[in-house]
């Protein structure tokens, strides 16, 4: 569904992504792992339309079989096409209520009943959010904010859901919970692109994984293969 | 002071204050979203007044038509200011947009002087607006009552848009985090344009009512009301719509009442606003309704 060919991204004078190639198949959980500065976030942000003036091709094939070149499109165009990004650091809107944050996620839609159904669906995935629906986003705990961020990106009914560091700053028990829900969302039919520092948790649920090093793909394979890979074990899984 | 006199002053203050409030709302909305003080806002107010003058007095259109045309014209000017002077600077440092705002303000004032000439022009008020209605010995002028009533209705409508509609949700979201809001599929430029349009329409209406109250228009008529409305916005807490209205009313009351009770101070009329500004900045820099910035956890 998504095909990245020879992607190059520059930030000022820094060549952050150098000739990255990557494929995402519909229905998969694909993970991008790698150290800080390896180009993971740059790649995911380019797909979401937040990076201007990159080189190379990112093409997306929608469920109807139509292929679109994403270069030059705006973030709002991506959301309308079915590509949603939940950004790093959760980025909940602190002054809006939980419910308003979810409604914002559904901004591109106008089917009121469908939106209410999806809000209920998010509440069923995260019962804590239902309890706190009228509370301001800024008053939630870190774990609850992450749940809200994941729920919010479901609200646009995306075809491809991208999550940037969903485990960041969460207690280990919550990491497990969040990943279990990502897996559940995938089972319900969403394709997921997961950018993670927590390589072990990500590889365990990924169908396909890419290890980035200094701006290009160093190793790729299934999640299981990479969990067994000596170089990956050495560098990312603590030996 | 007799009760009757006091009531006259009270209504007068309510009218002046709600006009400051209407202008202040435009400042506060744009600041809330872009962190930009739109110095050209007072000049949109002036354009609204001129447009209604030309429509009704020059072209002899009925007042209703003139008001609608003036609001449409001033709103269009507000949108053009955003498109030409601010939008190209969206990712530039804030100071660039601020300088651009000052430039636009000077430009509009001087353009108006060239096009409309610097001569003040008298606005002929429709007689039914000025015909006093005696109520228990108080002479109520319809215009004096209409101004606060229209203003409060407009504020209520605006609050409804901001808190109850989807574009309003987009506006509130943009004011906290533009990038995340874009990631939710909100067309940020459209929402910002809508904000300028709403603010400009309110400023134009304030300009029209101002031109009726002090029946004349001139190219620099927006400068002082603009500065005072900005003070009102700061007083009420920049970013808060009810705050802007409360700030405007407070300012209107301070100005009118201090002169009513101490007529000798009338020469200092314009200074009261600045005294109020200094006091609020010393005592409560975030303004009356200003929200404390919540730290992200």
Image (cartoon, coloured by chain):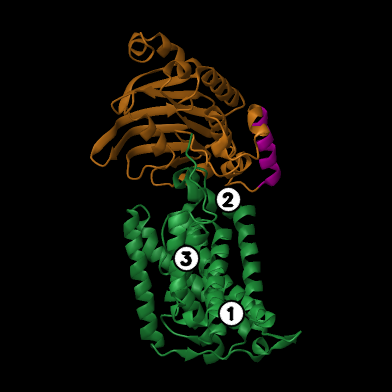
Chain colours: A orange, B green
Between residue B26 and residue A37, name the one nearer to us: B26
Evaluate whether residue B41 shows in this view. no
Neighbour tally class for label 3: few under 14, some 14-19, many 20 plus, Cα within 10 Å: some
Judged from the image, the secondary structure of the residue bearing numbered disc 1 is helix
Q: Which residue is mark 2?
A: B169
Q: CA distance from mark 2 to mark 1?
A: 29 Å
If you read the primary sequence from the N terminus, does the residue marked by circle 2 or circle 1 appear first?
A: 1
Give the side of residue B27 with respect to residue B162, left or right.
left
Give the label on residue B276, or none. 3
If you read the primary sequence from the N terminus, does the residue marked by circle 3 or circle 1 appear first?
A: 1
Q: Which residue is mark 1?
A: B67
Is B24 covered by the magenta stretch? Answer: no
- A102 above or below A200? below
Which chain letter goes with mark 2?
B
Are the residues at dot 3 and dot 1 in contact (C-beta closer than 8 Å)?
Answer: no
Residue at image location 47% in from the left, 17% down from the top: A201
Q: CA distance from mark 3 to mark 2?
A: 33 Å
Looking at the picture, how far across and down is residue B11, in whole percent?
64, 77
- A235 above or below B118? above
The magenta span reads: A111-124
Q: CA distance from mark 3 to mark 1?
A: 33 Å
Q: Nearer the viewer, mark 3 or mark 2?
A: 3
Residue at image location 43% in from the left, 73% down from the top: B271
């Amino acid at each position: 569904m998504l095909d990245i060919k020879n992607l190059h991204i520059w930030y000022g004078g820094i060549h952050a992504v150098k000739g990255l190639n990557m494929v995402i198949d519909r229905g998969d959980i694909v993970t991008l792992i790698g150290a800080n500065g390896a180009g993971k976030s740059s790649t995911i942000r380019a797909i979401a339309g937040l990076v201007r003036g990159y080189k190379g091709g990112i093409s997306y094939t929608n469920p109807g079989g139509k292929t679109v070149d994403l270069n030059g499109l705006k973030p709002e165009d991506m959301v309308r096409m079915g590509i949603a990004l939940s950004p790093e650091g959760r980025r909940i809107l602190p002054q809006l209520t939980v419910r308003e944050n979810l409604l914002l996620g559904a901004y591109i839609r106008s089917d009121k009943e469908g939106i209410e159904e999806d809000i209920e669906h998010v509440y069923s995935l995260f019962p804590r959010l239902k309890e706190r629906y009228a509370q301001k986003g800024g008053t939630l705990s870190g774990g609850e904010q992450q749940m809200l961020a994941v729920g919010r990106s479901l609200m646009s009914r995306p075809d491809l859901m991208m999550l940037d560091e969903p485990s960041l700053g969460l207690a280990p028990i919550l990491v497990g919970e969040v990943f279990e829900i990502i897996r559940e969302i995938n089972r319900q039919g969403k394709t997921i692109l997961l950018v993670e520092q927590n390589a072990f948790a990500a590889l365990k649920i990924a169908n396909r994984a890419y290890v980035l090093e200094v701006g290009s793909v160093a190793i790729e394979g299934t999640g299981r293969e990479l969990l067994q890979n000596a170089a990956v074990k050495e560098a990312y899984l603590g030996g | 002071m007799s009760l009757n006199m006091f009531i006259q002053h009270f209504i007068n203050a309510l009218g002046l204050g709600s006009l400051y409030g209407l202008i202040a709302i435009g400042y506060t909305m744009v600041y809330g979203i872009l962190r930009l003080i739109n110095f050209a806002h007072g000049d949109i107010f002036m354009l609204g007044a001129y447009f209604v003058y030309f429509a009704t007095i020059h072209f002899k259109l009925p007042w209703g038509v003139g008001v609608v045309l003036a609001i449409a014209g001033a709103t269009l000017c507000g949108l053009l200011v955003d498109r030409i002077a601010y939008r190209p600077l969206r990712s530039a440092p804030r100071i660039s947009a601020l300088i651009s705002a000052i430039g636009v303000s000077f430009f509009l004032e001087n353009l108006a002087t060239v096009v409309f000439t610097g001569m003040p022009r008298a606005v002929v008020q429709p007689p039914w607006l000025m015909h006093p209605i005696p109520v228990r010995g108080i002479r109520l002028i319809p215009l004096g009552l209409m101004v606060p009533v229209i203003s409060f209705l407009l504020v209520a409508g605006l609050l409804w848009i901001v808190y109850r509609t989807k574009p309003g949700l987009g506006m509130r979201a943009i004011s906290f985090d533009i990038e995340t809001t874009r990631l939710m599929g909100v067309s940020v430029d459209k929402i910002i344009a809508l904000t300028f349009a709403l603010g400009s329409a309110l400023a134009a209406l304030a300009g029209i009512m101002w031109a009726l109250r002090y029946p004349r228009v001139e190219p620099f008529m927006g400068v002082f009301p603009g500065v005072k409305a900005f003070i009102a916005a700061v007083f009420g807490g920049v970013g808060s719509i009810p705050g802007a209205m409360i700030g405007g009313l407070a300012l209107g009351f301070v100005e009118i009442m201090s002169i009513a009770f101490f007529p000798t101070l009338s020469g200092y009329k314009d200074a009261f606003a600045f005294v109020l500004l200094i006091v609020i900045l010393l005592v409560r820099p975030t303004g009356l309704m200003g929200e404390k910035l919540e730290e992200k956890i």
